[in-house]
Image (cartoon, helix red, strand yellow):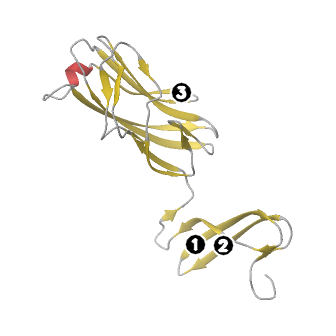
Amino acid sequence: YDSSGNYVYITNDEASKYTLYNGTHIWYTTATATTGDVTFSERMKISAGGNVTAPTNCYFSVELSSAASNVTGDDHNYTPIVFDTEHFDIGGNFASNVFTAPVTGKYLLETTLYMNGIVSGHTALRSHIRTSNRTHAISYINPYAMQDANGPLLLIHGSVLVDMDASDTAYVDLNVLGGARVVDVTPPYTRFQ
């Protein structure tokens, strides 16, 4: 503290602080800086009821806003699937249709794919969430047999809990086998988070 009771750096170093008020525990940190005023950022809060918030954990949610036409259907692997609308990206870890893990840990990833143009010649569909260390199957189905009764529409969804190292990447792909390349990936349900 300085003579006015303000937090100040003593030397060039990182700083942290902990507070406890009405049963709520709050941890703060600040980046390395020189002497002078200190600005802390909240990193974690545990309420008296045991609820934990960590406002700087990474979260992302992206979706497709306009149709990607004729991207698969003839055993062409559409990879990575393009997600052109970002709802949020806390931590800035999603770019160019790929999520990059900021730290080593477990990540819950999920995707929903909405397709149009499924025809009888399309005999198999494979979709994956691919990470640097492993390919995670989301679905392997006969798309024609599974399509909507009202037309050539198909919605698939899957989630995986993955082990990622810092800087590992994850993206979604789709491959429809048989027939012609006439399958579209369409909004409003196509997303990755």
On the image, numbered disc 3 is attached to which residue? 134
| Residue at (26, 21) in percent of width and height | 143
From what the image shows, is residue 17 above or below residue 135?
below
Q: Earlier in the sequence, mark 2 or mark 1?
A: 2
Q: Could you say whether the residue bearing mark 1 is in a helix, strand or loop?
A: strand
Q: Are marks 3 and 1 in contact (CB under 8 Å)?
A: no
Q: Residue 79, image x and y in percent? A: 46, 25
From the image, which quarter does the C terminus lie in?
top left
Q: Earlier in the sequence, mark 3 or mark 1?
A: 1
Please name whichever residue, 14 or 133, is drawn nearer the observer in this view of the structure. Answer: 14
| Residue at (57, 45) in percent of width and height | 93
Q: Which amino acid, mark 1? A: His
On the image, numbered disc 2 is attached to which residue? 18
Mark 1 crowd level (few <14, some 14–19, many ≥20, 10 Å Cα): some
Question: How many numbered discs, if any?
Answer: 3
Picture disc at residue 25: 1
